[in-house]
Image (spheres, coloured by chain):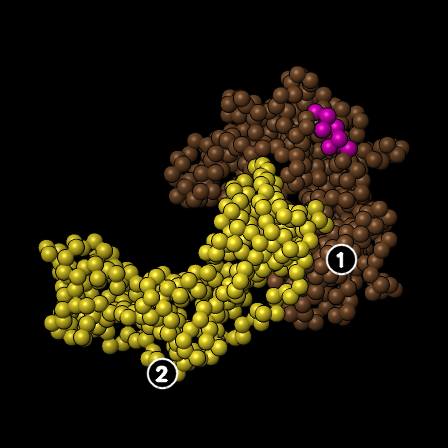
Chain colours: A brown, B yellow
């Protein structure tokens, strides 16, 4: 029996959420109807576009460009600051509604999820009308719109959901529908075909998904190895991974970086910024239920040049101080002393915490784990600055940085 | 050079020396097998890290030497009929190989330039039966490290003192120490690359024929009747392994080796290679419960044990326990646990011939 999978994607998530929030709080203008963007704080040198409204898109404003250049494209652009706490609330509220429609909900990112609707027809009727009910409920109860794609697997559901936005339901259930709706799309729209693969396919005279689906498998294998065979399967709508509710989004590594509001000259300051990043990374790592074996540090100079070093640890860890010690050593190895504009830290090579092999050399310190966990709980309950290391006292530096906007509560999720 | 040798003898020799030949080298001569006809036929493979010399009985018609590409030579000999093979070097190092109706002429390289194995200066040496050495290696080699960044752990420590020889390997999460009695009263300490040890393990047989181990400079050689293996040694100081062995234990149990191994193997059946799962051992008085929970399912079984300590719950990577237990031939073993997050050791009941130290896995529910 074919499964019925739905992909739910919030339309311009950050901006919609902010707009919905403002509307509920009595603002008269809807951000979605005017050229507007969610952008970072320019004063602390975080001035880029994080999300944009439909009208802003018409001006050619792109996610990731600087606010300065966005304003040049549209002088009356409205810029609102990001609000991660609000995003988490919206995310959770969305999940709650999704859970009513199926017990199998897989979070894919902060604004995307899959549900397995198979066997739910008796309660909510046929999938297309159920999707409409779901979409309307989200719009009425939460105040933002979503796109829903319905198909027999996650791949097609996601592609269907991306067809036309916003506020739409697209079903690609039969073979004919797939050929009609998916095959004419350019090949780079296919999951797994990025800016590296697309030109290679174009050189083979493959421009649409349909052409890829019908291409000679051996030709693809010759040029793209097993990857070619896989994406051809995708192009034919063949994919059978399960919607698994305990599956967290596929995490390969966790990283945070920050651009410092001022240039960093001294080692002492640099180490503090590094520590504040480690706090964030450590916390997210523990939340995710993983321990990491690889730590890498990236420094960015005032000339915007980046350099990075990494180090593999013997035993996987999720301890903030241990990550910091390694990161500090890595920074010492590569920093020439030139002023720094920003730095980042990333941990990867993750192993699940429930299989933490203890090493002969290091042993395992239960107390450190408990300390980290307790600090995490305090911070989540009472705010990020409720507990901080005394070295930050009077330093003018935030004790935790990266991914958090000061003054807001913690994101209690690895997303 | 002109010799006649039995196909099977020649093939055996090639198979052994080939292990020491570099599969890829910028110098073609190093991808070759050196052959020298003198009183008998001598074959050498040498990659500098490992060198193997093997002699076979042959009918020597003309002495001399030549180097032939190991892969091609090996493939040819492997497929020859089972009969005497004649090998003759004609002009310009061209080698003629003949066997019944088969005929090959392949290009060889002048043997003069081949790096021969260093001679022993016989400073430090000891002799023991091949079977004993084979056991020592077999019982320790599995816990040799594989991380090239921690070079010293990719080697096995071989230490002779007080008329005994010890082999020690450790990969950071487990350790194996085995010993055997020797007649010679010598003292030496050497770290031999694990992968060379694996090759030596394959060459040794289970007989009581002697193997002489001698240390000279930065090489160690293993001399058998018709074979000499020279391995490089790793520079550096081996970890002070004795310091990792705890002296105090919370729980000490005695358990049937085979029953325990089989239970663990059953418990690992529902683990996968993609995601590893620990086994949970629960010791309650004189029973041991082996429990594993994975995304495939659950397994559980109990064994009778003799417990001389307190109750304990501890998690392990089952592979580490199985590897150690499988190398033990005693019917019963003693397992001593220091704590639920500290090392445990597996030893014999009444002697100190072997010791396996294994670090546990932290169990999520004991957090």
In terms of secondary structure, where does tag 2 sit? loop
Q: Quadrant of the C terminus of chain A?
A: top right
In depth, the one of B186 and A92 nearer the eye is: B186
Q: Chain of mark 1?
A: A
- Which residue shows up at 42% across the image and 62% down it? B135
Across and down, in percent, residue A188 comes to: 54, 39
Q: Is residue B234 above or below residue A282?
A: below
- Which residue shows up at 70% across the image and 25% down it? A101
In depth, the one of B318 and B34 nearer the eye is: B318
Q: Which residues are magenta?
A: A93-101
In terms of secondary structure, where does tag 1 sit? helix
Residue B216 can be seen, yes or no: yes
The residue that mark 2 highlights is: B121
Across and down, in percent, residue B326 comes to: 47, 53
Q: What is the spatial separation of the Cα atoms under label 2 and label 1, in whole angstroms?
A: 55 Å
Q: Residues within 10 Å of mark 1 (few under 14, many from 20)?
A: few
Q: In the picture provided, is B13 more to the left or to the right than A70?
A: left
Residue A395 falls in which quadrant of the image? bottom right
- Which residue shows up at 23% across the image and 55% down it? B78
The residue that mark 1 highlights is: A367
Q: Is residue A293 magenta?
A: no
Q: Look at the magenta stretch and give its main secondary structure.
A: helix
Residue A192 falls in which quadrant of the image? top right
- Which residue shows up at 26% across the image and 62% down it? B14
Q: Chain of mark 2?
A: B
């Amino acid at each position: 029996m074919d499964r019925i999978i739905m992909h739910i994607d919030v339309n311009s998530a950050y901006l919609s959420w902010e707009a919905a929030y403002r509307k509920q709080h009595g603002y008269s203008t809807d951000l979605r109807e005017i050229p507007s963007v969610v952008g970072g704080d320019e004063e602390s040198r975080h001035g880029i576009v994080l999300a944009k409204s439909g009208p802003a898109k018409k001006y050619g404003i792109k996610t990731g460009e600087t606010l300065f250049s966005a304003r040049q494209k549209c002088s009356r652009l409205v810029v609102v600051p990001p609000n991660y706490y609000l995003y988490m609330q919206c995310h959770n509220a969305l999940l709650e509604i999704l859970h009513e429609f199926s017990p199998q909900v897989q979070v894919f990112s902060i604004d995307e999820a899959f549900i397995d609707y198979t066997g739910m027809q008796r309660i909510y009727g046929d999938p297309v009308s159920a999707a409409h009910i779901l979409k309307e409920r989200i719009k009425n109860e939460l105040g933002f719109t979503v796109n829903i794609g319905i198909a027999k697997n996650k791949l097609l559901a996601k592609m269907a959901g991306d067809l036309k936005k916003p506020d739409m339901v697209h079903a690609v259930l039969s073979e004919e529908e797939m050929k009609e709706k998916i095959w004419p799309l350019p090949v780079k729209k296919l999951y797994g075909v990025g800016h590296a693969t697309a030109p290679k396919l174009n050189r083979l005279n493959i421009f649409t998904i349909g052409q890829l689906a019908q291409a000679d498998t051996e030709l693809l294998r010759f040029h793209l190895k097993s990857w070619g065979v896989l994406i051809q399967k995708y192009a034919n709508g063949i994919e059978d991974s399960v919607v698994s509710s305990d599956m967290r989004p596929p995490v390969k590594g966790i990283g945070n970086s920050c651009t410092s509001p001022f240039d960093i000259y001294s080692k002492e300051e640099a180490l503090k910024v590094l520590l504040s990043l480690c706090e964030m990374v450590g916390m997210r790592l523990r939340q995710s239920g993983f321990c990491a074996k690889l730590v890498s540090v990236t420094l960015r100079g005032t000339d915007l040049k980046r350099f990075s070093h990494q180090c593999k640890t013997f035993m996987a860890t999720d301890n903030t101080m241990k990550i910091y010690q390694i990161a500090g050593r890595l920074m010492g190895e590569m920093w020439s002393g030139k002023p720094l504009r920003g730095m980042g830290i990333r941990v990867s090579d993750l192993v699940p915490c429930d299989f933490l092999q203890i090493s002969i050399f290091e042993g395992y310190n239960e107390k450190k784990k408990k300390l980290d966990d307790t600090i995490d709980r305090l911070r989540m309950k009472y705010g990020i600055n409720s507990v901080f290391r005394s070295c930050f006292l009077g330093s003018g530096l935030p004790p935790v940085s990266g991914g958090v906007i000061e003054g807001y509560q913690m994101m209690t999720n690895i997303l | 050079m002109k010799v006649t040798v039995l196909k099977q003898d020649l093939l055996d020799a090639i198979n052994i020396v080939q292990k020491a030949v570099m599969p890829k080298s910028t110098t073609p001569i190093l991808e070759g097998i050196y052959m020298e006809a003198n009183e008998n036929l001598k074959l050498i493979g040498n990659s500098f890290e490992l060198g193997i010399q093997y002699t076979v009985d042959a009918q020597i018609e003309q002495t001399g030497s030549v180097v032939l590409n190991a892969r091609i030579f090996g493939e040819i000999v492997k497929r020859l009929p089972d009969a005497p093979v004649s090998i003759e070097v004609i002009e310009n190092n061209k080698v003629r190989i003949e066997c019944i109706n088969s005929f090959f002429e392949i290009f060889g390289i002048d043997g003069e330039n081949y790096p021969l194995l260093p001679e022993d200066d016989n400073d430090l040496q000891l002799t023991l039966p091949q079977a004993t050495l084979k056991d020592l290696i077999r019982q320790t080699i599995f816990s040799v490290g594989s991380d090239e960044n921690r070079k010293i752990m990719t080697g096995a420590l071989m230490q002779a003192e007080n008329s005994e020889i010890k082999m020690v390997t450790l990969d950071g999460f487990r350790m194996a120490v085995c010993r055997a009695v020797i007649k010679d009263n010598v003292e030496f300490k050497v770290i031999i690359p694990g992968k060379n040890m694996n090759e030596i393990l394959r060459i040794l047989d289970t007989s009581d024929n002697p193997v002489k181990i001698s240390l000279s400079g930065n090489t160690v050689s293993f001399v058998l009747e018709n074979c000499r293996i020279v391995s490089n040694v790793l520079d550096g100081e081996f970890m002070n392994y004795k310091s990792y062995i705890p002296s105090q234990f919370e729980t000490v149990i005695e358990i049937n080796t085979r029953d325990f191994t089989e239970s663990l193997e059953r418990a690992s059946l529902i683990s996968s290679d993609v995601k590893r799962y620990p086994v949970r051992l629960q010791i309650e008085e004189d029973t041991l419960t082996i429990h594993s929970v994975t995304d495939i399912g659950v397994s559980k079984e109990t064994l009778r044990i003799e417990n001389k300590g307190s109750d304990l719950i501890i998690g392990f990577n089952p592979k580490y326990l199985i590897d150690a237990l499988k190398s033990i031939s005693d019917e019963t073993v003693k397992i001593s646990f220091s704590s639920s997050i500290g090392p445990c050791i597996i030893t014999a009941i009444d002697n100190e011939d072997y010791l396996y130290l294994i670090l546990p896995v932290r169990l999520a529910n004991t957090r």
